[in-house]
Amino acid sequence: MLDRDGPIPVYKQIAEVIRERITSGDITSGEAMPSETELESEYGIARATARRVARELREQGLVYTVQGEGTFVGDPDIPRAPRKTPLYQQISHEIAERIRKGEFQPNRAIPSEKMLMEQYGVAKVTVRNSVAFLRDQGWVFTVPHRGTYVSQPEDWPGTQGTAS
């Protein structure tokens, strides 16, 4: 449990928790440490505090950051764990499945960026990439300053390239 009123800054306490997860093998070399968004959600902290956690672990030599990809355990020379489907695509597949099931109807808005950020616990750029992916596939269209809407079923991609 974090001591928010004690003498040790919260970011140092969280960094210690992550360090213990690394030394215990819970997070192994090449694996990503929890993202800023995950740290914010799990510990109820601000983005700036989450960044300080990563910086603290970098200064301890436990992790390294790859711009746009995340912060990983170990030395940069150690190969990173193979990535699964990118998170923005996973979110896109979920939304596409909800469209296919009728949860989101044609010509009706999908949830806002803010709602999707909160629902999936991701940054705005991840949501924007998800929506762009859906738009490129034909699931949705965007009306500037109004929102993003479900396309007509005839514009949806065939079933062979959709959600898994």
Image: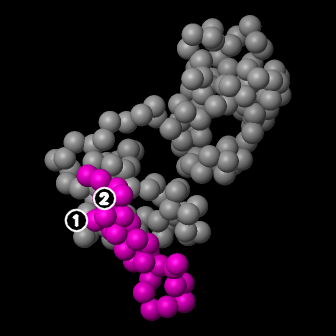
Residue 21 shown in magenta? yes
Decide: is 154 above or below 48: above
Decide: is 22 above or below 163: below
Q: Earlier in the sequence, mark 1 or mark 2?
A: 2
Question: Which residue is at a point 36% across and 64% down the rendered structure image?
Answer: 21
Residue hosting label 2: 25
Which residue appears farthest toward the bottom when viewing the image?
7
Q: Label 1, label 2: how many angstroms apart (C-alpha)?
A: 16 Å
Question: On the rendered structure, is 89 left or right of 13?
Answer: right
Question: Which residue is at a point 73% across and 42% down the rendered structure image?
Answer: 112
Dot 1 alpha-carbon crowd within 10 angstroms: few under 14, some 14 to 19, many 20 or more: few
User: What span is in magenta?
Assistant: 1-29
Residue hosting label 1: 61
Decide: is 68 above or below 151: below
Residue 51 placed where, x, y %?
43, 64
* Res 119 seen here: yes
Q: Amino acid at mark 2?
A: Gly
Q: Amino acid at mark 1?
A: Gly
Which colouring convention does the figure follow?
A: one colour
